[in-house]
Amino acid sequence: MFLMGVADMKVTIGSDHGAVNLKEEIKKVLTEMKIEIDDVGTFGNEAVDYPDIAEKVADSVVNGRADKGIVLCGTGIGISIAANKIKGVRAALCHDVFSAKMSREHNDANILAMGERVIGVGPACEIVKAWLTSEFTGDRHARRVNKIMALEK
Ligand code: RB5
């Protein structure tokens, strides 16, 4: 399989206990795409707090240890809200391919969020592929993304 734009890409992925299965399925896709994976957990069914996982993934992305991040929880809502509290993060909660592509092309999202209790494995994997192979289109969208980032100050 040849997909544009993923050569030498590194992705940090993390989930709470509500999305461990989905995390494993997505890791298979990343492996197929020959993407380097940094899995920050969690690794079992014991309950963990999703902000702790969001912080680990976000830290990896904003400090350049990964090109992009994927965060997962039961709904994707809590972990995306938490990730977006970290400066430099643009986390997008996407449960369809169109939104995933737009989050890259228009919003330059650097973290993708999804919920295992919301979406099936098949659609989630298609979303991951679309998200990782879509590029930011810049231009007028760059001005808007810059304004988003200015809101952090
Ligand atoms: C954990 O039970 C659940 O609240 C979490 O996975 C997520 O859905 C929160 O937004």
Image (cartoon, grey):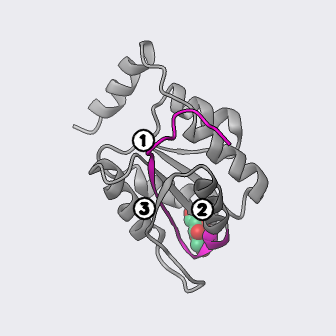
Name the one closer to the observer, 65 or 53: 65
Q: Which residue is mark 3?
A: 54
Callout in the foreground (2, 3): 2
Q: Earlier in the sequence, mark 2 or mark 3?
A: 2
Q: Which mark is residue 90?
A: 1
Q: Residue 150: image x %, image y %?
A: 27, 30
Three-letter code for the amino acid on which mark 1 is drawn: Arg
Query: Magenta stretch: residue 90 in it?
Result: no
Q: Earlier in the sequence, mark 2 or mark 1?
A: 2
Residue appearing at x 50%, y 76% in the figure: 42
Q: Residue 90: image x %, image y %?
A: 42, 41
Give the answer, above or below, for where 124 lies relative to 104. below
- Give how far apart the Cα atoms at labels 2 and 3 are: 17 Å
Give the answer, above or below, for where 23 lies relative to 149. below
- Circle 2 packing at 10 Å, graded few (<14), some (14-19), many (20+), is many
Give the answer, above or below, for where 49 lies relative to 139. below
Q: Are marks 2 and 1 in contact (CB under 8 Å)?
A: no
Disc 3 is placed on an element classified as helix
Magenta extent: 1-21
Disc 2 is placed on an element classified as helix
Residue appearing at x 51%, y 40% in the figure: 6
Residue appearing at x 36%, y 62% in the figure: 55
Q: Are marks 2 and 3 in contact (CB under 8 Å)?
A: no
Image position of 121 (left or right of 149): right
Q: Which mark is residue 27?
A: 2
Residue extending farthest left: 153
- Circle 1 packing at 10 Å, graded few (<14), some (14-19), many (20+), is many
Q: Quadrant of the C terminus?
A: top left
Three-letter code for the amino acid on which mark 2 is drawn: Lys
Disc 1 is placed on an element classified as loop
Three-letter code for the amino acid on which mark 3 is drawn: Ala
Residue extending farthest top: 140
